[in-house]
Image (cartoon, helix red, strand yellow):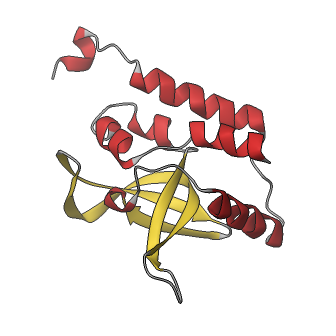
Amino acid sequence: QDNYLEELQLARLSRAKLAKFVHTPFFSKTVVGAFVRIGVGPMPGRPGCNYRIAQIVDVVETRKVYKLEDTITNKGIKLRMGTEDRVYRMEFVTNTEFVHYEFQDWLTIMKRHNLPIPPIDEIRKKQEDITAAENHTYTDDDVSV
């Protein structure tokens, strides 16, 4: 399981990376299928925020324009946590890595709902997509309006 968590970390997008990619033509292709650590509100009985591991299943336009790091956007990400899909603004995604108990919670939710854990080859493919986006060299066609 620790190896899987390490692989999953490499398919994780931080808020900073989402902000870096948000206005690119390959944003949806890059982010759909990736994972994020999302703040989902206060932690019952404890100070601080409750975070969950979620998979990005879609990119949507929201009614609100908001600040995302050093840019602004109206894009939201539809996240899947177990059997629930919900749209979040990317400003609620953290820049920090998944922690072990969040990973255990994610595994428990997946098992409780008899949902398949994404295979390692799927995780590695998403890692490759993220790396390709980070290393993208813009052409004249990309830049011309």
Residue 88 place in picture, x, y as percent: 40, 64
Residue 94 place in picture, x, y as percent: 41, 55
Q: Residue lying farthest top?
A: 140
The answer to whether residue 134 is left or right of residue 111 is: left
* Residue under the point 56% across and 65% down: 52
* Residue under the point 30% across and 63% down: 62
* Residue under the point 75% across and 31% down: 121
| Placement of 26 over or under 87, stated as above or below | above
Residue 102 place in picture, x, y as percent: 63, 63
The answer to whether residue 70 is left or right of residue 34 is: left
The answer to whether residue 127 is left or right of residue 7 is: left
Q: Quadrant of the C terminus?
A: top left
Classify residue 124 by image quadrant. Answer: top right
Q: Residue lying farthest bottom?
A: 45
| Placement of 54 over or under 31, stated as above or below | below
| Placement of 9 over or under 74, stated as above or below | above
Numbered disc total:
0
* Residue under the point 53% across and 89% down: 45
Residue 34 place in picture, x, y as percent: 55, 44
The answer to whether residue 116 is left or right of residue 89 is: right
